[in-house]
């Protein structure tokens, strides 16, 4: 009998293959560390491939004498790499005992020769980790198989980088992984606030995902990335390096500061007025300042000083202070910021009365890798008056909505992702953004939809004690409201009585059967 043919093995994509190689570092490197190992090597491979491509162009143009001139690479947004920093050198020496030193030297040399990479690459990182040489060699060999230049339109290296960031966030679990905001949430913010041109700012930029998706938004809508300027800040040194590499891989130049710094105690962009702010600040951050610190900070001007017990409203006021006269901010906060008394209520009421709050959007649970709670997307807008904005072939004729706030409830929206998580599909994002833009504009036909959206007036919000909890405004469909309970109970009683009568009839028929058979039985 012929053997059944074995099912063909599923071909692993490059991301999965790399992830398997990275996992081989387990046991020799802490999970929170090996993302820096992998992503630094991926960066070196990418930078080297771009360098070799540009070097080939110069040779083809007959400009061999300029091969060692940094300027001839920088003019094409390519990093200059001396011989000891090139991937071919790393790959050839992958099995040498001193490969960690060679990698550190390569990273140092690349950063030294390219000012745009200042502070972006790890410093003597590989030497300090004391990695198993054979496992490191295996990882280098796998990365060697990535053709980063094969399909420029699909951003292979960016895709790999993003895949690793999301998987590291998943692997590190709750309490860690703060460096990464799920992509579908970032996409939603970009599609809603539409950062076509101007200055984009993220005061807690993590690994730079907000900037990357902003640029993708511009590309997807046929905009010009040169119309966008990027500003950011990150408090953790290793995460700042991830962000700088993330931007460098995609050719995005940005001002993230020379060093990591706390946004509250050392604002790196004191004079910045941003046209767009996209952020995912730490949720419910405690003890963010001492009792006597930042009590007269200009960022709180016109508002109460945010309490030391929770930084949510400090982040909000920091972002408000950074907005230009037409600036829009989209950011994520824990749901607790929507209500509550005391100082937070006073600040919230002032934000509402100042006509800054434009939309409050409740997101589904299980969207974040670090927490399973439902969170809120806030949109603040410095200009809710009637005006017209043109972005290429897109024209927005905004109506005056100063006295309104849009509430949206997305808890029933989304699709499964990575088994236990939820994400928005592209269709979801389009529909949500369309609802928001329809509400904003003059000629559109917005309608309140039960259990989905509601446009509330400032007076309605004031009447509800300045609460921004969407369920206080969005209509709930009571699917039992048309039931006559007395009539229903009477019907159930009749049905139950019929069941009892039927049971009695069955007993009688059964007794008769036994009697005919000569048995005397009582049921």
Image (tube, rainbow, N blue to C red):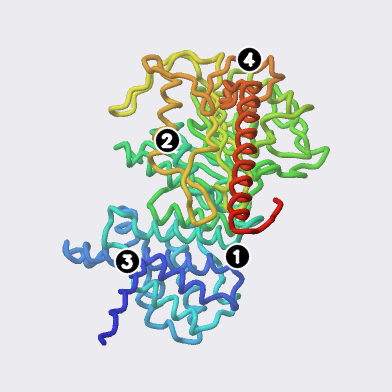
Are the residues tagged 2 and 4 within 8 Å (C-beta)? no
Q: Which mark is residue 322?
A: none
Query: In the rendered view, would you say 7 is above or below 215?
Result: below
Check disc 1 and report the residue beneath it.
32
Pointer 3 residue: 49
Left/right of residue 292 with respect to residue 254 in the rendered view: right
Q: Distance between the residues labelled 2 and 4?
A: 28 Å
What residue is pinned by disc 2?
Answer: 191
Q: Classify 10 Å Cα crowding around label 3: few (below 14), some (14-19), many (20 and above).
A: many
Q: Which of label 4 and label 1 is nearer to you?
A: 4
Residue 282 % position (x, y): 65, 45
Q: How far apart are marks 4 and 1 (CA)?
A: 47 Å
Residue 152: percent from left, percent from top: 28, 56
Badge 4 is on which residue?
460
Q: Kindly report which numbered mark, 4 or 3, lies closer to the viewer in this rendering.
A: 4
Q: Nearer the viewer, mark 2 or mark 4?
A: 4
Q: Could you tell me how far apart the alpha carbons at marks 2 and 3 are, in whole angstroms?
A: 33 Å
Determine if residue 381 is in view.
Answer: no
Q: How far apart are marks 3 and 1 (CA)?
A: 28 Å
Query: Which SS class for mark 4?
Result: helix
Mark 2 and mark 4 lie on one chain; the one further toward the N terminus is 2
Q: How far apart are marks 2 and 1 (CA)?
A: 32 Å
The part of the image, by quadrant, that contains residue 429 is top left
- Secondary structure beneath dot 2 equals helix
Q: Of the residues tagged 2 and 3, which is closer to the observer?
A: 2
Q: Residues within 10 Å of mark 1 (few under 14, many from 20)?
A: few
- Do tag 2 and tag 1 residues touch (Cβ < 8 Å)? no
């Amino acid at each position: 009998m012929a053997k059944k043919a074995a099912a063909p093995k599923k071909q692993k994509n490059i991301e999965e293959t790399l992830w398997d190689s990275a996992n081989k570092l387990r046991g020799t490197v802490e999970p929170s560390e090996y993302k820096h190992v992998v992503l630094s090597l991926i960066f070196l491979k990418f930078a080297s491939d771009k360098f070799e491509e540009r070097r080939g162009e110069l040779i083809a143009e007959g400009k061999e004498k300029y091969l060692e001139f940094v300027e001839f690479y920088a003019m094409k947004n390519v990093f200059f790499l001396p011989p000891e920093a090139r991937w071919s050198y790393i790959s050839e020496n992958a099995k040498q005992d001193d490969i960690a030193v060679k990698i550190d030297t390569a990273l140092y040399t690349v950063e030294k020769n390219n000012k745009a990479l200042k502070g972006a690459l790890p410093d003597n990182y590989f030497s300090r980790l004391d990695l198993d040489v054979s496992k490191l060699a295996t990882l280098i060999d796998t990365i060697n198989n990535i053709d980063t230049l094969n399909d420029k339109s699909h951003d292979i290296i960016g895709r790999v980088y993003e895949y690793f960031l999301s998987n590291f966030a998943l692997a590190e679990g709750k309490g860690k992984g703060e460096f990464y905001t799920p992509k579908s949430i970032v996409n939603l913010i970009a599609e809603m606030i539409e950062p076509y041109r101007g200055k984009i700012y993220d005061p807690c930029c993590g690994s730079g995902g907000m900037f990357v998706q902003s640029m993708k938004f511009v590309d997807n809508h046929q905009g010009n990335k040169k119309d966008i300027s990027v500003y950011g800040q990150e408090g953790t040194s290793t995460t700042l390096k991830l962000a700088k590499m993330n931007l460098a891989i995609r050719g995005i130049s940005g001002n993230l500061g020379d060093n990591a710094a706390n946004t509250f105690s050392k604002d790196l962009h004191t004079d910045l007025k941003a046209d767009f702010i996209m952020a995912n600040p730490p949720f419910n951050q405690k003890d963010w300042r001492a009792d006597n610190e930042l009590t007269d900070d200009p960022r709180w001007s016109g508002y109460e000083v945010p309490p030391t017990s929770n930084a949510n409203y400090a982040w909000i006021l920091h972002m408000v202070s950074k907005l230009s006269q037409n600036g829009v901010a989209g950011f994520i906060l824990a749901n607790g910021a929507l209500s509550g008394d005391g100082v937070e209520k006073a600040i919230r009421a002032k934000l509402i009365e100042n006509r800054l709050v434009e939309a409050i959007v409740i997101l589904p649970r299980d969207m974040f890798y670090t927490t399973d709670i439902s969170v809120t997307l806030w949109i603040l807008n410095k200009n809710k008056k009637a005006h017209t904005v043109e972005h290429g072939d897109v024209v927005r004729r905004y109506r005056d909505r100063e006295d309104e706030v849009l509430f949206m409830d997305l808890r029933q929206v989304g699709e499964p992702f990575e088994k236990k998580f939820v994400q928005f599909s592209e269709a979801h994002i389009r529909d949500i953004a369309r609802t928001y833009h329809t509400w904003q504009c003059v000629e559109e036909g917005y309608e309140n939809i039960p259990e989905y959206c509601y446009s509330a007036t400032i007076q309605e919000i004031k009447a509800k004690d300045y609460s921004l909890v969407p369920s206080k405004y969005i209509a709930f469909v009571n699917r039992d409201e048309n039931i006559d309970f007395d009539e229903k109970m009477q019907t159930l009683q009749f049905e139950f009585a019929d069941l009892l009568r039927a049971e009695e009839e069955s007993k009688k028929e059964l007794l008769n059967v036994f009697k005919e058979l000569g048995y005397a039985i009582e049921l």
